[in-house]
Amino acid sequence: MPERQTRQTEDQAGLGGKRVHVNAATLVGRPAVILAATEKLFAEPTKKGAVEGPRDEVVRPLRGRFAHVPYSSEDLIREKREEAELEDRSS
Amino acid sequence: MVAAREVSLDESTNDVDILGVITEAVPQNLPGYLPLINLIPFCEADVTEVGQEKLIEVSLVNADGELQIRWYDTYVVPSPRCPGERSFFVPVFPLRNVPFVAAGNHAFSVAVNGDHKNSLPFYVHPPAETDEIKQGE
């Protein structure tokens, strides 16, 4: 059986044999700065696309379609009732 | 996947410039928040997934694996540049007011349709007044 010749790898100009040395650069990134938390920050309304985690019960006390109302649903009901009474008196 | 301060996109050439890669943070005080960090996952999808809507969720977890906060968005897999290629795309997530309660190892974990794909480690140094080096002096 004739001996099979392998591809010569010493030929720098041929395929599969050339290696080029590259000086790799090391990057050291500047750390980000975490700002101190404020009550106002955690009282901001939910941003679109955000789903909150375990902090819900602390910073998001209102739920449902009245979440945008700055007071409780009981206050809203009482206010509406007072408005209705005023309208009855004026009519 | 990388996290960076700034990301700029030239829509005319589709060039994306990523500026200020960050892997750690130094707090003024804890609990605190990071005003803005851009999370940039480099994604690829099979040709059969082109046009499908994917739910991409980014979760911030602490060293104990406790969920701190989660963001989500839906993304439609775009067509590849050439027929037959896999689809490569880079959705950029601008995460605002990222809360940090304690120092230590954190990670931004990315899941697609509920399946975890990758996590990016993010280390929060202790505040300067509780620096371990200064405590030893």
Image: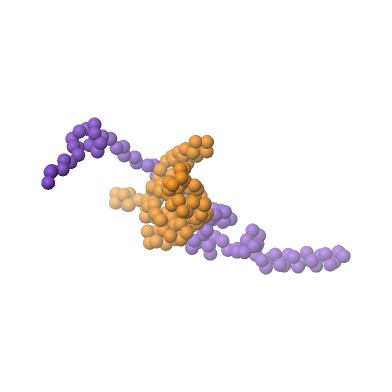
Chain colours: A purple, B orange
Say above or below: A72 vs A11. below
The residue nearer to you, when weighing B24 against B12, is: B12
Q: Which residue lies at the image location 64% right of the left edge and 58% below the top edge?
A: A68
Q: Position of residue A32 (x, y in %)?
A: 42, 45
User: Could you tell me how many numbered marks the image carries?
Assistant: 0
* Res A34 seen here: no
Extreme-front residue of the structure: A1
The residue nearer to you, when weighing B58 against B43, is: B43
Q: Position of residue B74 (x, y in %)?
A: 52, 54
Q: Which residue lies at the image location 65% right of the left edge and 62% below the top edge?
A: A66
The residue nearer to you, when weighing B130 against B122, is: B122
| Left or right: residue A13 compared with residue B7 | left
| Left or right: residue A65 compared with residue B128 | right
Q: Position of residue A39 (x, y in %)?
A: 54, 55
Q: Which residue lies at the image location 13% right of the left edge and 43% below the top edge?
A: A3
Q: Position of residue A14 (x, y in %)?
A: 24, 34
| Left or right: residue A7 compared with residue A61 | left
Extreme-right residue of the structure: A91
The residue nearer to you, when weighing B88 against B3, is: B88
Q: Which residue lies at the image location 71% right of the left edge and 67% below the top edge?
A: A77
Say above or below: B106 vs A61. above
Say above or below: B5 vs A48. above
* Res A12 seen here: yes
